[in-house]
Image (cartoon, grey):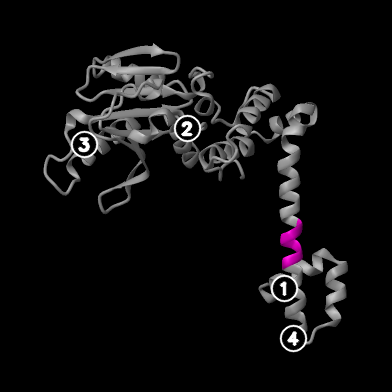
Amino acid sequence: MERQLLQWHPAFCAGVQIELAEAGADLTFIREYQLGRKPKQVDLLVIKKEGTQRIRKNIGRIFRRHNIVEYKSPKDSLSVDDFYKVYGYACFYKSDVKAAESVDMEELTITFACHRYPAKLFRHLREKRKFQIRKVEEGIYYIIGDYLPIQILLLNRLPEKENLWLRNLTDHLSGEEQAERLVKEYWNHKDNTLDQAVMDIIIRANRKQFEEAKNMCDALRELFAEELKENYQAGEDQGRREFSRLILKLSELGRTDEIIKAAESPEYQEKLMKELGV
């Protein structure tokens, strides 16, 4: 159940922002951009500022002014219907503007990001649409033959050195060594909310690997020690504040005989706090 409730899309959007950080000042990232009045939305819209240089990062070299990105989580496949749905979104985005022709079709691109090799879609594009599928580098395929520039990113095949976070945005990390590598990289950017968003979903989706890594590696324990200490202290302080509020509430209600019982029993304390809304 927990695996089904994991929020992959916000983490993916954060991962794209991390990957494109070098050009971050030139890009605007809009999550779940809504198309029209009805609930039509693309997973990520990346708008490049006019007059800026081309993106050098591998996943963004294809980008123009307006870039629509569709993401499939680890359990999902990229289907033929997905392709046409997103292509339709691109056309809708071009037309759904206040000023006529304010979005030039020549300034639109489409990116599909998935984990599973879309063999059926590739076959359809080759045989039915007569498109070429060109592998430009590991994990990155360009669809050649359409008016719009289109690319497909196979996240788990992207080069780890260049695309660490997107490559590992999965629920099947290879093992504790990979978990350690991610933790060490995260430690250098742990105050960044984007890194936090990606790391959070990766840890929760690969709990076993991270638990094994923390138990087996002294270096990791040292890395986590300070953060765990801070979290523990924060938890203690919060607990004391909540118990103080509970004592005050019980005193106001004349239920002072319950204060000692609450102090001795965390379960009873929690019950009272829920009952009294503390």
In the displayed structure image, the side of residue 101 where residue 93 appears, left or right: right
- Residue position for label 3: 91
The numbered mark, 4 or 1, whose residue comes first in the sequence reads 1
Question: In the structure shown, which secondary structural element does the residue marked by tag 3 occupy?
Answer: helix
- Residue at 57% x, 34% y is 189
The span from disc 4 to disc 1 (Cα, nearest Å) is 12 Å
The numbered mark, 2 or 4, whose residue comes first in the sequence reads 2
The numbered mark, 3 or 2, whose residue comes first in the sequence reads 2
Q: Specify start and end residues of the magenta stretch as a single range.
A: 236-241
The span from disc 3 to disc 2 (Cα, nearest Å) is 28 Å
Question: In the structure shown, which secondary structural element does the residue marked by tag 2 occupy?
Answer: helix
The span from disc 2 to disc 4 (Cα, nearest Å) is 52 Å
Q: For the residue carrying disc 2, how many other residues have a C-alpha within 10 Å: few (<14), some (14-19), or many (20+)?
A: many
The numbered mark, 3 or 4, whose residue comes first in the sequence reads 3
- Residue position for label 4: 253
Picture coordinates of residue 268 (x, y %)? 81, 69
